[in-house]
Image (tube, grey):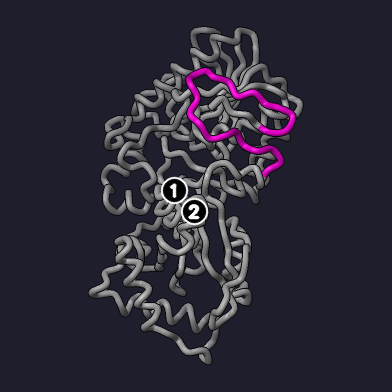
Amino acid sequence: MTTIYLIRHAEAEGNLYRRIHGWYDSLITENGFRQINALEERFRNIHIDAAWSSDLYRTCTTARALYVPKGLPLHTDPELREVNFGGWEDMAFGAAYHFHREEMTLFNRVSPSWRAPGGENLSEAGSRLERAIRRIAGQYPDQTIAIFSHGSVIRQFMANAKGLSPQEWNTLPHSENTAVTCMTFDGKGFQFLFQGDASHLPEEITTMGKQMWWRKDGKAEDVNLWFRPLDRETEQHLYLEARRDAWTGTHGPDIPFDGEGFWSDARRHLDQSPWGVSVAMVKEEPMGIVQLDRERYGQDGAGYIPFCYISPKWREHELGIQLIGHAVSHFRPLGRDKLRLRCAPYNQRAQHFYAKYGFVKIGEEKNSRVPLDILEKYIGFGRQELRTEFPPPPRCQLEKGQAITPTSDRMHSPC
């Protein structure tokens, strides 16, 4: 009889930025590291013989809660990955709801007829995870193992393991980040001792506790944004009104507003990319703007955000982080491993927001009309160890079953 702890990864970028991340490789958030610390404490006195994880960064990093303090190697297997969302990978949830509403309705209903474009359906993903768990568990008779995987595929595996019909799939609850399911495997079937337990997380560091998309009690839904390029021919007024509101709200009316200069910059950034000035949308309503400059700081491997704005109506809805997520999605494929922006030191609201989500001051702007701090957020793979006691494993693709072995100081990669 094998005892299995099946654990969902900690909060990652997709959970925070509200983007669809299946096989897309994403980072753990600042809050996710707090969840990992709580998970480590939960398992401090629980014996584990082996640790396995999907080969994606967010699961390997979460697995450090167990395999590092227990001195175990980490084995990885791509069959433990999340559902493959194909053409939807890294799409904003708001865009999926806006452009693919019927398909998203099927997905939310856990319909057997849903399939990601160019990816998997739920049955295939659940069967893949079940196949992997059976194979892994068979290597450890009468031992206890931990397996780290992903929310949607864990849910579908449980439906399979419980023998639920497709009509019953949607009766299973969603699991919190780092939620733990404990079960036994006798070589034939699974017996569940408990499932989806996240009691090790204080309420203030939960993920789903701050979201409403999973609720069935009629409460308001989360606001998921989608983005479109600014139309330079018809939306100059929209852009300049946002710029003026941000300028006077931060610096006051006594310092002249340079609308012509700001619009010149906007046109230049739109020449770099259609996304150079992106409009954030709530359904059909513009609610914000995020401006993206591919040239400035490019020599430093950074993507620059000259302007990040939310209209007054939407400022109490905690939507700003989705604009940052859009910037990450834009710059990371270009090989940028940092975001940079400028913020007035006396703009305390903005300073607090950026600090909360990982931006740090690296300098001050020279020759500016107003005082401006230069803030930076790391978005690459390899330096997240600065935010946790234990550095995460190096980012690489391991062969199935290949182990990462912990050392006394940091991880050494076979690749």
Q: Residue 41 at what x, y percent from top left?
A: 73, 35
Q: Mark 1 = which residue?
A: 335
Q: Residue 50 at what x, y percent from top left?
A: 63, 18
Query: What main secondary structure does the magenta stretch of the protein show?
Result: loop
Q: Quadrant of the N terminus?
A: top right
Q: Residues within 10 Å of mark 1 (few under 14, many from 20)?
A: few
Q: Is residue 200 left or right of residue 100?
A: right
- Mark 2 vs 1, N-terminal side: 2
Q: Residue at x 54, y 83 (%)?
A: 369
Q: Quadrant of residue 65?
A: top right
2 and 1 marks in contact (CB < 8 Å): yes
Q: Residue at x 50, y 84 (%)?
A: 248
Three-letter amino acid code at the position of disc 1? Gly
Q: Mark 2 = which residue?
A: 301
Observer able to see residue 193: no
Three-letter amino acid code at the position of disc 2? Gly
State the extent of the magenta-drawn residues as a range: 388-410
Observer able to see residue 393: yes
Taking the magenta stretch, the answer to whether it contains residue 154 is: no
* Residue placed furthest toward the bottom: 254
Tell me: residue 124, above or below residue 173.
Answer: above
Taking the magenta stretch, the answer to whether it contains residue 401 is: yes
Tell me: residue 50, above or below residue 196.
Answer: above
Helix, strand or loop at label 1? It is loop
Q: Is residue 203 left or right of residue 154?
A: right
Q: Residue 7 at what x, y percent from top left?
A: 57, 30
